[in-house]
Every structure is written in C-alpha cells, then in structure tokens.
C-alpha cells in the first residue's frame, strides 16, 4: 500500500484560505495565493486576534515577535513570556491546534535593545490511511513548527528596527518503507525585518500616542516537499499598521488600530487564463506554470506586485485589512473588538472578533472569539487563549517575599 497524503495537503491548504465557495459566477475569478507552511500566517495570540488579527503598531507585548518584533525595544517591562493556545477549525474537527511560546528580554542599562524568541507548533491532528476494504493500515500526525530568534534596537527616541531569523519544518506525511514511499518533512529558513515609530502628540490638554509600524516576514527559501519535487513559496508577507491611543478619563484609555497586509508571493497561473483547448494555449500555460515553479523567492517578491492577470484591480484584491479597538482600565482590564476582511476572490475570510483581558502584577490572561460573516466558514467560533508572565512583576513578588 502506498501512503496517500491528500488529506494532509488539503488540511494544510485549509489553514490560511478557507473560503465559503459562494456563487458559481465567481468561479473564473477565484484565485487565492497558494503557499506552503500556511500555519505561519495564523495569528498566535488572543490580543491581536480579538482586534481582527492586527498588531503592527499596537503597544508592545510578549507576542510582538509575530506582528512586529521591532516593538520590543519600546517594551515597558524588562522581559516577559507568553503561552498561547488556539483550537483550529473546531467546527470540522477537534484535534487540530496551534500552540505558541514567545518571550523577550531587554539588554543593557540604556533600555534601547532587546532579544526575543518564539516557538510555534501546529498539529493537524491524526490522519489515517486505509488499504483495500477500508481496513486501517497506519495513522500519522502531520505537523508544522518553527523556531525563531530576534533582535531589536532603538535608533532614536521614537524609532526602532528589528530582525528575526527563523527555522521552519513541515511534516505532512510519513515514510512507508514497505511501499517504497519515502515521504519526508521539508525544512526552510527565513528572516523578518521590521520598523516601529511612536510619538506623543498633545491634543487639547491630553497627551495621546500615535504609532506606525511595518513588518516584512518570512523572506527566505522555498519549502520543498516530496524530496524537492514540489517546492512551495513561504507566506512572505508585508504588514503595515497604525495605532492611535487617547485618554477617555483618568485610568481609562482607548486605542484604534488599522493593519494592511499583502502576501509577497506570485499568483499561480490558472488554466482559465489560457486557451488550453489549443496546442498553443496549452504550451503557454505549461510554460507559465514552469516559470512559476522555478521562480526564486526573491524574484517572486517583486513579481507579486505585477503578476495578477486582472491588473491593478486584482492586485488590490490581494490586500487584506483589519480594524480594531482596545479599551483599557488602568492597564489591568481590557475589552477589545475588531473586523478582518479578505476579498471573496482571494479567500473570502471575513469575520468579527472580540475579546477581553485581565492583568495583575505578575500574570495576564487574554481570550478572544471569532464570529465569521462568510456563510459556512469553518473559521467561525474560533477561540484563542494567551497567558503572559511579566518578569518585572515576578521580580517584585519574589523580592517582597525575601
């Protein structure tokens, strides 16, 4: 018996692009960007998720490694560690999840630089392969994981930059030596570069905070499945964001936030764009597909701005946006809400999100809930939980006990 990886591959594709396939009349225009290791695009923490999946310019926290690692240089605490857990596609199955561990530590005495790291583990649950007669032959547990380490530094009182280096491993199958199937996991390396600017303008008698941020993530090698026979682009992404925070009253603040995202990955050629009923059209399609498969990741980044067959209109469709707000009382109690939008022809992920958080000196607990607006979306009712430990709080706690 030869192992069939179709279930695993379909599950992996479902991570980032789970459209509610709507009317038949959009069939010819539906063309989402296809990448490997799509779990890298899943928001890991409850705070960012509860505002519609954003965080490029929000105040720094332990999970800034995913959104914009340059924010760590402006972190208020000496360090922190956060653990997040997300049951994924829970409307379809009950054993797919994302676990994320992230943290940072400020370096030196000048409060201008930080080291950070994160570890992600995405489990696709248990998949069984069957032989003739539907007899269970073997089971497998496909998964994807990544580990990264970053450095951020203030370049001025208001601006910082950061870099991250990441190792990625994706294992969507297993080797069946009896059948000669030597399916193995795929590895890749990538890097992120980011920037963060924050200032404190006076509006009336109130001191506000206005921040801008950007992050280009997963710039790196392709991930090569099946011993290099099926290379796939990493989900290289450009994120731009802004945040504005203003006081409502003593101890009460409100921030409004906006993020824009675009995958820096060229669109896969479609047969619908070629006259494949003729030998010439078939040759043109095969040539375009071969060029896409052989294209280097760096060439693909630049190509992603001009490859859409629909021109600028389709390029604009590839931009997703998130808008969210966060209310804070004395930096101890938080309420959040937001909305995420993706064009129906590029994936059709559209959902509202809400969440809350409670913080003590040592620990903070955040939770978020997603409510999809697209009909029959498997992302509906997604929950996230994040537990954060503050190093300054732990140090003060143990110091008082002594």
Image (cartoon, grey):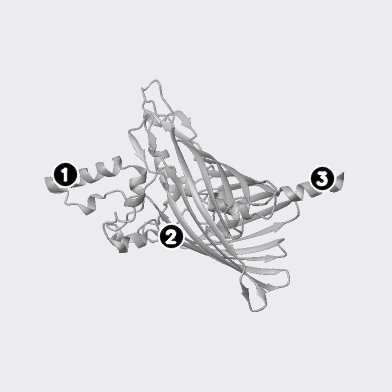
Query: Does residue 101 appear in this view?
Result: no
Earlier residue among tags 2 and 1? 1
Q: Name the residue nearer the viewer: 182 or 289.
A: 289
Q: Residue at x 63, y 74 (%)?
A: 202
Percent x, y of residue 242: 52, 64
Q: Are marks 3 and 1 in contact (CB under 8 Å)?
A: no
Earlier residue among tags 3 and 1? 1
Q: CA distance from mark 3 to mark 1?
A: 71 Å
The vertical placement of 331 against 15, above or below, is below
| Residue, disc 2 | 320
The vertical placement of 56 against 93, above or below, is below
Percent x, y of residue 395: 78, 47
> Of the numbered discs in the image, which one, if any, rests on residue 283?
1
Identify the element where label 2 is drawn: strand
Earlier residue among tags 2 and 3? 2
Q: Residue at x 72, y 68 (%)?
A: 251
Q: Name the residue nearer the viewer: 299 or 360.
A: 299
Q: Residue furthest top?
A: 178
Horizontal side of 230 relative to 326 (left or right) equals: left
Horizontal side of 237 relative to 333 (left or right) equals: left
Q: Residue at x 38, y 35 (%)?
A: 224
> Of the numbered discs in the image, which one, if any, rests on residue 223?
none
Circle 3 crowding by C-alpha within 10 Å: few under 14, some 14–19, many from 20: few
Q: CA distance from mark 2 to mark 3?
A: 45 Å
Circle 2 crowding by C-alpha within 10 Å: few under 14, some 14–19, many from 20: many
> Of the numbered discs in the image, which one, if any, rests on residue 398?
3
């Amino acid at each position: 018996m030869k192992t069939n990886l179709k279930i695993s591959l379909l599950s992996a594709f479902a991570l980032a692009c789970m459209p509610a396939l709507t009317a038949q009349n959009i069939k010819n225009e539906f063309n989402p960007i296809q990448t490997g290791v799509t779990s890298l695009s899943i928001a890991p923490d409850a705070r960012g998720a509860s505002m519609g999946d954003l965080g490029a310019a929000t105040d720094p926290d332990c999970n800034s490694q995913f959104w914009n690692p340059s924010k760590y240089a402006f972190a208020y605490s000496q360090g922190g560690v956060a653990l997040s857990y997300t049951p994924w596609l829970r409307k379809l199955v009950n054993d797919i999840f994302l676990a994320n561990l992230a943290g940072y530590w400020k370096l030196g005495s000048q409060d201008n630089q930080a080291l950070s790291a994160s570890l992600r583990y995405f489990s696709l649950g248990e998949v069984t392969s069957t032989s003739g007669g539907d007899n269970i032959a073997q089971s497998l547990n496909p998964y994807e994981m990544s580990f990264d380490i970053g450095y951020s530094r203030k370049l001025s009182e208001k601006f910082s930059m950061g870099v991250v280096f990441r190792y990625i491993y994706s294992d969507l199958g297993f080797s069946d030596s009896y059948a000669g199937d030597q399916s193995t996991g795929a590895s890749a390396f990538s890097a992120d570069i980011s920037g963060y600017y924050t200032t404190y303008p006076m509006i009336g008698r109130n001191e506000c905070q206005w921040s801008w941020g950007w992050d280009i993530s997963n710039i790196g090698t392709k991930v090569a499945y099946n011993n290099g026979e099926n290379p796939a682009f990493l989900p290289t992404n450009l994120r731009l964001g802004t945040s504005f925070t203003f006081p409502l009253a003593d101890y009460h603040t409100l921030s409004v936030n906006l993020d824009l995202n675009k995958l820096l990955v060229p669109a896969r050629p479609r047969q619908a764009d070629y006259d494949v009923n003729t030998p010439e059209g078939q040759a043109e399609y095969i040539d375009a597909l071969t060029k896409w498969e052989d294209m280097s990741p760096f060439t693909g980044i630049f190509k992603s701005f001009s490859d859409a067959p629909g021109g600028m209109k389709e390029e604009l469709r590839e931009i997703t946006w998130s808008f969210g707000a966060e209310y804070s009382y004395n930096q101890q109690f938080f309420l959040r809400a937001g909305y995420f939008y993706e064009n129906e022809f590029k994936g059709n992920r559209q959902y509202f999100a809400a969440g809350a958080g409670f913080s003590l000196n040592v620990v903070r607990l955040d939770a978020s809930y997603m409510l999809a607006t697209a009909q029959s979306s498997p992302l509906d009712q997604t929950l996230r939980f994040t537990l954060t430990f503050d190093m300054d709080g732990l140090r003060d706690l143990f110091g008082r006990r002594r």
